[in-house]
Structure formats: structure tokens, C-alpha cells
Image (spheres, helix red, strand yellow):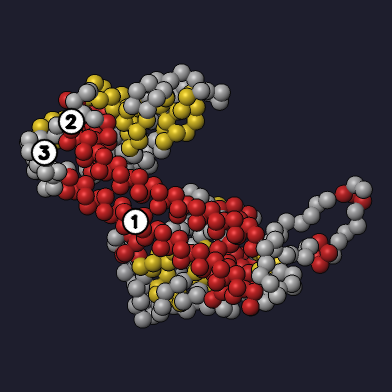
Amino acid sequence: MSSKTKPTATTEEATPALVPKLRFPGFSDPWAYEPLSKVLKEHKLKNTDGRDVFSVSMEYGIVNQIELLGRSFAAADTSHYTIGRRYDVVYTKSPLKAFPFGIVKQCKFDGEVALSPLYGVFTPPNPYLGLMIEAYFESPNRSKDFLSPLCQKGAKNTLQITNTTFLSGRLPLPTEPAEQQKIAECLSSVDELMAAQARKVDALKTHKKGLMQQLFPREGETQPRLRFPEFKREWNDATLGDLCFSVSSGKDTRESDGAFDLYGSTGVIGKTVTPSFDTPHILVARVGANAGHLTKASGQFGVTDNTLVIRLKPAATIDYIFHYLGSININNLIFGSGQPLITGSILKAQRVLVPTASEQIKISTCLSSIDGLIKAESDKLEALNAHKKGLMQQLFPSAVEDEG
């Protein structure tokens, strides 16, 4: 039967019974697919007592602004800021690359804090439903599907959406508080595992950073503060230009049926037919938000014109120079506010202190072993993240209507 001849369905008939693929025993009632206004209430309490200002981060949630950003960006008078309380749900209305319509997070701290008056702050009926709503919006696709029809883009890419409009959007949620609790506790346990794993990764990165400060000479010094006992010779003072044949930018010759990796500012971004290089090199992002980003490439590969290629002489090993450049604050070599840039001439002028080849290898091996640990723990964190995404697909039903 043609869709044109189908009878008009009632609202109840048009929305199928929502049941997740994976469910805890003892629950059988269909989920509701109703506006958020049914479960979230905007309280509009104002910060009249000068509470600390918190910001919202996709990675870290709702945290102290100074601790997150290093300084406060709040107005001098924050009495018009909104109070955020434990378990409140916050919608930022601030676009991010992966979340162009803003992000949604739940307050998980004790007490009360001040939040930007630009945020929407809502109180759920219980902490479990608030956590479920936060988890729902952790997916870029789900977030976009929910928010895109509700938002309008204003001048300078600002989002135009009222709190009432946000609450008018619908998403599937269980009606029984006991089921809400079961799902929230399941997701919370995964979050706790991910948080613990993230702390392991951060601890390893901090350890590596501290070790690099000891293994490489600090600014103004000619010898490192920590050396392997078998090495006694002083380090040679040189520039990167002394240690390399060239520092040059590439040319983007990408084609869809290419056979070789093509590197851009963040790593491999595609394929290229004609490789530009065929030995190990250090690549440095030349321009844009990723300027200064370091990558190592080997074998046959091509690079874009946004990438600088450091072609080293035999006196310096690639791993040593890669770690050395990672130990300095390479951001200090970048200039330009509108379009950050680092040039080959600036890189070649960079001072580099170089030990013997055997000591270079020893230092590189030590740091590379830590890199291996960091990658292994990061892979575990990514596996937990993938596990949670899979759980979400099973624990939440689809609200898409059956068109068949």
C-alpha cells in the first residue's frame, strides 16, 4: 500500500512501544517517549551568596573553573549566575567540534556552585534519571539528533535555544524508578572503572613528563640532572639545523585510490599515490590549531603542505630528537593568534643538546618503554569506552518509528 493511502495514525499508534534490547529481570513495562519537561524542572535559583564558579567540560564534567581552565572567566558580579546543586542536569548551549549543539552533564559534587547564566540548569526527580540523561547525551550522534531540530544558529555561530525549547525535546526513558536506578548504577559502575583507568593513564603521563625534565638539560643548563651511570661525556650544544639535512613542507597529492599513507597535522589523514619520503622522519604540524604536533613516520609516505618534515643526519637518532622536541615547550615557537604557525627556520634555530649515540639510544629506549605502557593503558581505557557505548545501544531503545 502506498504511504499516501495509509490512514492517519493517532499519536499513541504512531509511537511504537519502546523496549530496550537488553533489560534487567523483573521489568517489562514499555518506556515513555515524552518531552524532557516531564522529568526535568528548571529551578532558576540565583547565586546571591557568592559561591565558586564552575565550568562544564565534555571530558571532566562540571568542575571548578580555576582548576579546569587555570583562571576564572566569570564576571566580577556573579549574583545573577545560576546555582547548580548535586544531581542537577546542566545544558551548556556552547558548541564543541564533536558536539556542535552543546553538551549535557550532571552535577556530581556535594554542595552548591555558581554556573554561567547562559547554561540551562534543571532538577530531575531522582539522581538516577539525571545520570541516564547525561549518558544519553554522551553520544555525538544522539546529541545531534535530539538538539539539531531545536537549535537555530545565530551570529558568529552562536546557538539560539531557550531552556523551554530544550525541555520540549523528547527522548526514551523508563517509567519505573527501580529500573532507572538499575540502569544508572550499571552505567555508574562503568564510569568508575573508566575514571580509575584514566587516572592510571594520567599518572603515567605525569611520570614521563617528570622523567623527561630530568633526562634532558633544562633551559640554561648544559647537562641533564639524571644520567645513566655508564655515561660521563659532556653533551654537545647544537641547533636542530646542524643536526638535519632539511626541514621542509610537503605537498598534498592525495587521491582516493592511493597506496601510501598521507600525513597531515594530526597524523594519517588519507592516501597518496606518489610517496614523498621513504625513510623514518619526524613530522611537525606547521599551521592551524594543531601547530607543533609531533608525529614519527617511516616507510613510504606522503605529507600535506601543512606538515614540516625533519630529515635528520646520522649524528642524531630519530627517537632521541623526537623525545627531545617533546620535552621542550614547543608552543613557545608558535606565533600568530588568528592562524597559529611554526616555520622550518624557527625549528632549525632551536637549540638541541646531544649526547653520544649510545646515550641517545638509552634515553630513547627508556622513554619509549613508558610510551608503550601509556598506550597499553590508553587502549584499556578506549576498550572501556567502547564497552559503555555498546551498553548504551543495548540499554536504550530506539525512538525511530517503523516506516515499514
Mark 1 or 2: the one toward you: 2
C-alpha gap between disc 1 and disc 2: 31 Å
Helix, strand or loop at mark 3 = loop
Q: Earlier in the sequence, mark 1 or mark 3?
A: 1
- Which residue is under mark 1? 202
Furthest residue to the top?
274
Q: Is residue 152 visible?
A: no
In x, y percent, where is residue 272? 48, 23
Q: Residue at x 36, y 49 (%)?
A: 374
Residue type at mark 1: give it: Asp
- Which residue is under mark 3? 231
Q: Nearer the viewer, residue 109 or 81?
A: 109
Q: Are marks 3 and 2 in contact (CB under 8 Å)?
A: no
Left or right: where does residue 185 sit relative to residue 46? Answer: right
Q: Are marks 1 and 3 in contact (CB under 8 Å)?
A: no
Q: Is residue 31 above or below residue 313?
A: below
Q: Are marks 1 and 2 in contact (CB under 8 Å)?
A: no
Tell me the number on the disc at residue 357: 2
Q: Is residue 32 above or below residue 397?
A: below
Q: Is residue 364 above or below residue 88?
A: above
Residue type at mark 2: give it: Ala
